[in-house]
Image (cartoon, grey):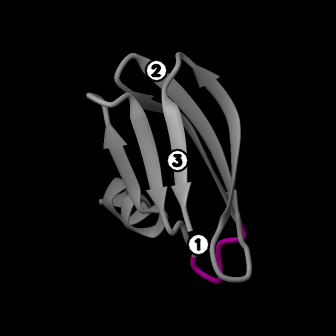
Amino acid sequence: MVFQLVTGMLGLLPDATQNRLTLDRPRLPPWLYWLELRGLRVGKSRINLRMIQGRENAAVELVGRHGDAEVVIRR
């Protein structure tokens, strides 16, 4: 259930066939100032992300990546 909540807030759209992780209009609720996700798997890659509360959308920082998966952020 927690993963579904995070997926909805951040608009996570993993696509292993295209080796891509898309974040579609990522947002954090007003009470959550930052969130860090580690070890997200996309195909054979692992991705670490940090999201920080922004005015309209969350700012997304790619903290680490093992593999060659692409990270796309749609505003």
Q: Which quadrant of the figure contains the N terminus?
A: bottom left
Q: Amino acid at mark 1?
A: Leu
Mark 1 vs 3, N-terminal side:
1
On screen, residue 14 above or below 42: below
Residue 28 tag number: 1
Q: Element type at marker 1?
A: loop
Residue 27: give x, y in percent of width and height: 56, 72
Q: Is residue 2 magenta?
A: no
Residue 4: give x, y in percent of width and height: 32, 60
On screen, residue 68 above or below 64: above
Residue 49: give x, y in percent of width and height: 62, 43
On screen, residue 63 above or below 67: below
**Left or right side of 26 for 42:** left
Residue 72 tag number: 3
Q: Nearer the viewer, mark 1 or mark 2?
A: 2
Q: Which residue is mark 2?
A: 45
Separation of residues labelled 3 and 2 (CA atoms): 15 Å
Separation of residues labelled 1 and 2 (CA atoms): 25 Å
Mark 1 vs 2, N-terminal side:
1
Q: Element type at marker 2?
A: strand
